[in-house]
Image (cartoon, rainbow, N blue to C red):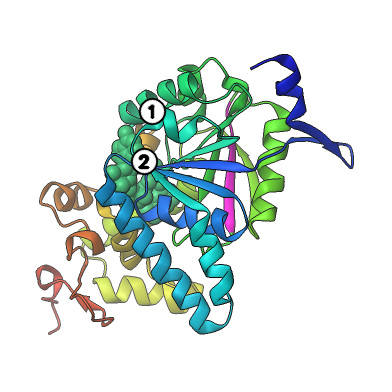
Amino acid sequence: MTLEAETMSLKKENGIMSYDIKTVTIIGSGTMGNGISHVFAQCGFAVHMMDINQVALNKALATIGKNMDRQVTKGTLSEEAKNEAMGRISTYTDMAEAVADADLVVEAATENIELKLNIFRQLDEHSPAHCILASNTSSISLTRIASVTKRPGKVIGMHFMNPVPVMRLVEIINGYGTDREVTQTIVKLSEELGKVPCVVNDYPGFISNRILMPLINEAVLALQEGVAGIEEIDTIMKLGMAHPMGPLQLADFIGLDTCYSIMHVLHMGFGNQKYAPATLLANMVQAGYLGVKSGEGFYKYTPGSKELVVSDRFVSRKWD
Ligand SMILES: NC(=O)c1ccc[n+]([C@@H]2O[C@H](COP(=O)([O-])OP(=O)(O)OC[C@H]3O[C@@H](n4cnc5c(N)ncnc54)[C@H](O)[C@@H]3O)[C@@H](O)[C@H]2O)c1
């Protein structure tokens, strides 16, 4: 990439420097990757969706189509706009091809530090020099991720919430060396996607999970100590604190393995015992009770049923 091409993609508007983003590559097409692809395609960007196999990509395309159909039924998207958006998404299993003309990459692969470091080494090698490399990580240090690239100034966190087409927040995480114009670009872009960006610094758990995960962990500790049952804990937080969902139901929705791994990041990152994951949480993860994705966590889930049923392992209560 020549200096001329590098400066060509930077523009100044109302005193704010930002890069011109047209083509976006999404790495990983799972829960978050398909939602992120959906939102970018709906907002007019060319989307290259990449995963390790075509089966995952086909499943993601089907999910995006189904979610857009729901918008069409509700009247928030026209059939024509849906078809145009779907037409903007192309799929890849080869990373070099997927990022060859990308202005921005949003990595949304599995939450595993070695896997992400490896992906960012490859992204740095294969993407154009002007390309911004963002990660949707829930907890891994952006400064650490940036350190394996030759462009730490262009590495940033773009943390979407699940489900992406519905949730309005984008938590933007500045790595230690992230360039100002890169942050400004991602702020502006998030607004173009109809989202509300909030910029934070790179500390374990950022803001969202530094506050949410200890809340969930405390709910698990209260359950473990027998202070109250699952329904009581969730009802108290829903009705007493106006939370839309109780912390134990939310943990099932996020995935107990994800909750455990984020608590581990907080525990190690701050070196403070107050972040130690609850033993009950660790046991449930070890035993494979991961919440919605495995069919059972604090509640049990039957496909097609929306009824919230407490797992049999927690139903006996002293006063029953
Ligand atoms: N699920 C959530 O609620 C949530 C919310 C915010 C952020 N996140 C973060 O988003 C990221 C993705 O989470 P998810 O829930 O979508 O996971 P997921 O398991 O649903 O999807 C991960 C996808 O990444 C793919 N993948 C794995 N290795 C890859 C590679 N080398 N190249 C390309 N693709 C690869 C997998 O095949 C899979 O399709 C994680 O970093 C997670 O912490 C998740």
Q: Is residue 145 above or below residue 292?
A: above
Question: Which residues lie in the magenta part?
Answer: 169-175
Contact? badges 1 and 2 (CB < 8 Å): yes
Residue that carries the numbered disc 2 in the rendered image: 109
Percent across and percent down for residue 82 are 53, 69
Between 151 and 23, which is closer to the camera in this rendering? 23
Residue 115, image quadrant: top left
Where residue 188 appears, as percent x and y from the top left, is 72, 47
Q: Is residue 245 left or right of residue 221?
A: right
Q: Position of residue 318 (x, y in %)?
A: 13, 77
Residue 117 belongs to the span the image colors magenta: no
**Cα distance in 3D space between marks 1 and 2:** 9 Å
Q: Is residue 310 above or below residue 20?
A: below
Mark 1 CB near ligand 1 (8 Å cut): yes
Residue under label 1, please give it.
119
Badge 1 element: helix
284 left or right, relative to 152: left
Q: Is residue 213 visible?
A: no
- Which residue is found at the position 89% from the left and 37% from the top? 15
Q: Quadrant of the C terminus?
A: bottom left
